[in-house]
Image (tube, rainbow, N blue to C red):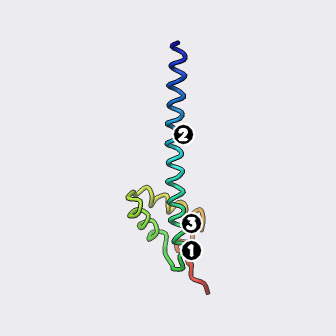
């Protein structure tokens, strides 16, 4: 009996943990889509401007930090500016 209740609690904690991870994944995907919107918007922005916009939009400095990380992975750390205008 005692062992069964422990297993139920452990399963409940796993479900809560997976829900949290799912929400974090969705949050990250939203930030990535936000960054991609700037990248394909047709104007030129630097990473700091996009990160500041993410901070303001998502009301979290974590969003800006993740935006910079994502942009550096996508466009390289040397490239601090996204040029989306066509020549």
Residue 18: numbered disc: 2
Q: Label 2 to label 1, Cα distance in Å?
A: 32 Å
In the picture of the structure, the residue carrying the numbered disc 3 is 77
The C terminus: image quadrant: bottom right
Counting from the top left corner in percent of width and height, residue 33 is at: 54, 63
Mark 1: which secondary structure?
A: loop
Q: Label 3 to label 1, Cα distance in Å?
A: 19 Å
Q: Residue at x 50, y 49 (%)?
A: 24
Tell which tag, 2 or 3, sits nearer the viewer: 2
Q: Residue at x 56, y 72 (%)?
A: 79
Of 46 and 3, nearer the camera is: 3
Counting from the top left corner in percent of width and height, residue 11 is at: 54, 28
Determine whether label 2 and label 3 are within 8 Å by CB: no
In the picture of the structure, the residue carrying the numbered disc 1 is 40
Q: Residues within 10 Å of mark 3 (few under 14, many from 20)?
A: few
Q: Residues within 10 Å of mark 1 (few under 14, many from 20)?
A: few
Q: Earlier in the sequence, mark 2 or mark 3?
A: 2
Counting from the top left corner in percent of width and height, residue 68 is at: 50, 63
Of 79 and 10, nearer the camera is: 10
Give above or below for 7 relative to 47: above
Number of numbered discs visible in the structure rendering = 3
Mark 2: which secondary structure?
A: helix
Q: Earlier in the sequence, mark 3 or mark 1?
A: 1
Q: Earlier in the sequence, mark 2 or mark 1?
A: 2
Counting from the top left corner in percent of width and height, residue 1 is at: 53, 12
Tell which tag, 3 or 1, sits nearer the viewer: 1
Give above or below for 84 relative to 47: below
């Amino acid at each position: 009996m005692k062992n069964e209740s422990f297993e139920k609690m452990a399963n409940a904690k796993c479900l809560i943990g997976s829900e949290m991870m799912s929400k974090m994944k969705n949050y990250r995907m939203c930030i990535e889509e936000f960054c991609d919107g700037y990248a394909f918007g047709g104007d030129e922005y630097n990473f700091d401007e996009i990160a500041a916009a993410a901070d303001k939009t998502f009301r979290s400095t974590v969003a800006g930090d993740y935006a910079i990380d994502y942009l550096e992975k996508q466009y390289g750390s040397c490239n601090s500016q996204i040029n989306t205008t066509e020549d």
